[in-house]
Image: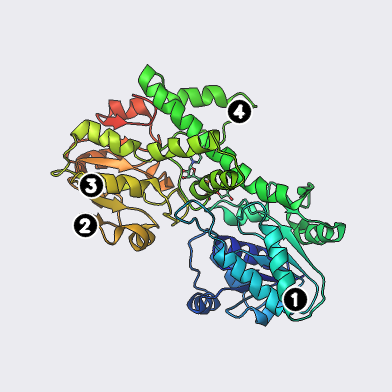
């Protein structure tokens, strides 16, 4: 099929690369011409395992990059809108890039086409898309048939390619059998062994994305709140996690306690769902609590440091392992590490940081204006003479470090672990003062 994808971010690039891998003719469009120039040279703007290879392999064969929408849209049967839908200050979803892309589609198309909403957008957005396209066609007295589809994306950063290539499900919200069939034809190479194609009405599909992310965020905030209670009552959340996960109705996934969830999706989508409900006259109770629990959780490690060293940290220096919101990505958006660093600096401390991938993005987005931060490119060097090690992201290289080396380098052997990576008793035996989440 001939496809245009608008937006060369995580979702756009992954979708474009994977569709092209299946033999479709794909053009990815972005307004940022520098990004397009770089993509044409094989320079990919994000770190995502497997993505660069896939793009280079298919470039100029089945995958093309361009900064002009007219270039490919006139030949396309399907256009995906995968532009950013960030959060506004008031919690509403910023739809201006999305609606502008829609308008451009309406101005250009000359043939029947399927317009697919891939960006995460509030319930009811497909109706707005229909209205805008219709208005633009009327202005040109064009009378062609188009359909609007909601197709939320569930890929995870760090495993985006595998998630896209082997999806748990493809959710499609559409209005005609013909459109469902065309979308199923496009996706069927990705689920050859099982039918994973779920058809529904457009609003339910739009809602599915928010409900999925809110459910996952709820699981995390739930276990994090249980962890807080565990510390109070003298229980061990690591054991409780296994104890409850063994119930197949609960399951082991997504109940790992930690320093809070971050990233470009959960924080934004949980807030947005609350705001969407409010705009429709309902005040959420559970969903707003999920966010409150997470806000507190993001500071839990900083609070443990303060409990240990006191409110005035002016003579203290801490080594941070990990900046990205999770391993396998250089994405630092809403990462708990940033909240912890800011809080420690606020209390007068200085920090030294190491992350295998995310230092540049962290500087660019959050840290460049702050003082008292030093950056290192080795996980051991960063420890030199620090008052404690704080682990914020569970990168594989942090999972089994040389504890003797850590002990030698730190001023005193103290570890604050925001991801419960190490065996509590082993570390105590090795002579560490070791702080976890949900166990004291
Ligand atoms: C998420 C959804 O998983 C994905 O389906 C959706 O399309 C986009 O949002 P992503 O943001 O890439 O994907 O990250 P994910 O792997 O889901 O992790 C989100 C956050 O939750 C991370 O900060 C992670 O550390 C945290 N987390 C996850 C926990 O604290 N505990 C867990 O048990 C699982």
Residue, disc 4:
250
Q: Secondary structure at mark 4?
A: loop
Residue, disc 1:
137
At a point 60% along the width and 74% down the height, the residue shown is 29
User: Residue 13: image x %, image y %?
Assistant: 59, 65
Q: Nearer the viewer, mark 4 or mark 3?
A: 3
Q: Confirm whether residue 27 shows in the render.
A: no
User: Residue 280: image x %, image y %?
Assistant: 62, 45
User: Residue 97: image x %, image y %?
Assistant: 56, 67
Q: Nearer the viewer, mark 3 or mark 1?
A: 1
* Residue found farthest to the front: 281
Specify which label sits upstream in the sequence, 3 or 1: 1
Residue, disc 3:
346
Circle 2 residues within 10 Å: few <14, some 14–19, many ≥20: few
User: Residue 429: image x %, image y %?
Assistant: 29, 25
**Label 3 – label 1 distance at C-alpha:** 55 Å
**Label 4 – label 1 distance at C-alpha:** 50 Å
Specify which label sits upstream in the sequence, 2 or 3: 3
Q: Does the closest atom of ligand 1 sit within 8 Å of the Cβ of label 4?
A: no
* Residue found farthest to the top: 233
Residue, disc 2:
371
Specify which label sits upstream in the sequence, 4 or 2: 4
Q: Quadrant of residue 6?
A: bottom right
**Label 4 – label 3 distance at C-alpha:** 39 Å
> CB of mark 4 within 8 Å of CB of mark 2?
no
> CB of mark 2 within 8 Å of CB of mark 3?
no
Horizontal side, residue 271 vs residue 419: left or right: right
């Amino acid at each position: 099929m001939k496809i245009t994808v608008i937006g060369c971010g995580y979702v756009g690039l992954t979708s474009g690369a994977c569709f092209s891998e299946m033999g479709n003719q794909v053009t990815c469009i972005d307004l940022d011409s520098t990004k397009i120039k770089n993509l044409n040279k094989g320079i990919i703007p994000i770190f995502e395992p497997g993505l660069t290879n896939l793009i280079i392999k298919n470039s100029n064969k089945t995958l093309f990059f361009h900064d002009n929408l007219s270039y490919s849209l006139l030949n396309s049967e399907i256009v995906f809108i995968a532009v950013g839908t960030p959060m506004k200050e008031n919690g509403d979803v910023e739809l201006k890039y999305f609606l502008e892309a829609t308008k451009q589609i309406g101005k250009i198309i000359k043939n029947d086409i399927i317009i697919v909403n891939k960006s995460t957008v509030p319930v009811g957005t497909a109706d707005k898309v229909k209205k805008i396209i219709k208005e633009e066609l009327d202005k040109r007295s064009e009378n062609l048939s188009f359909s609007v589809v909601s197709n939320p994306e569930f890929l995870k950063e760090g495993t985006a390619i595998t998630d896209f290539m082997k999806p748990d499900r493809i959710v499609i919200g559409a209005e005609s059998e013909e459109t469902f069939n065309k979308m199923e034809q496009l996706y069927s190479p990705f689920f050859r062994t099982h039918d994973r194609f779920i058809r529904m009405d457009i609003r339910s599909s739009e809602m599915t994305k928010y409900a999925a992310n809110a459910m996952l965020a709820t699981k995390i905030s739930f276990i994090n709140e249980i962890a807080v209670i565990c510390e109070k009552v003298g229980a061990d959340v690591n054991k409780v996690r296994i104890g409850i996960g063994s119930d197949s109705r609960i399951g082991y996934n997504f109940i790992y306690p930690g320093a809070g969830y971050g990233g470009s999706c959960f924080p934004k989508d949980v807030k947005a769902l609350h705001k969407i409900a409010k705009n429709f006259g309902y005040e959420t109770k559970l969903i707003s609590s999920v966010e409150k629990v997470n806000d507190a959780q993001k500071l839990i490690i900083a609070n443990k440091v303060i409990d240990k060293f006191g409110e005035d940290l002016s003579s203290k220096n801490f080594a941070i392992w990990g900046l990205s919101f999770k391993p396998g990505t250089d994405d630092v958006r809403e990462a708990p590490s940033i909240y912890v660093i800011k809080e420690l600096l606020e209390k007068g401390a200085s920090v030294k940081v190491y992350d295998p991938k995310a230092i540049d993005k962290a500087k660019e987005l959050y840290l460049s204006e702050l003082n008292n931060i030093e950056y290192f490119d080795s996980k051991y060097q960063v420890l030199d003479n620090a008052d404690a090690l704080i682990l914020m992201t569970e990168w594989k290289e942090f999972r089994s470090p040389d504890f003797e080396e850590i002990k030698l380098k730190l001023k005193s052997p103290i570890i604050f672990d925001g991801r419960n990576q190490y065996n509590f008793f082993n570390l105590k035996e090795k002579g560490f003062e070791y702080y976890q989440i949900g166990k004291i």
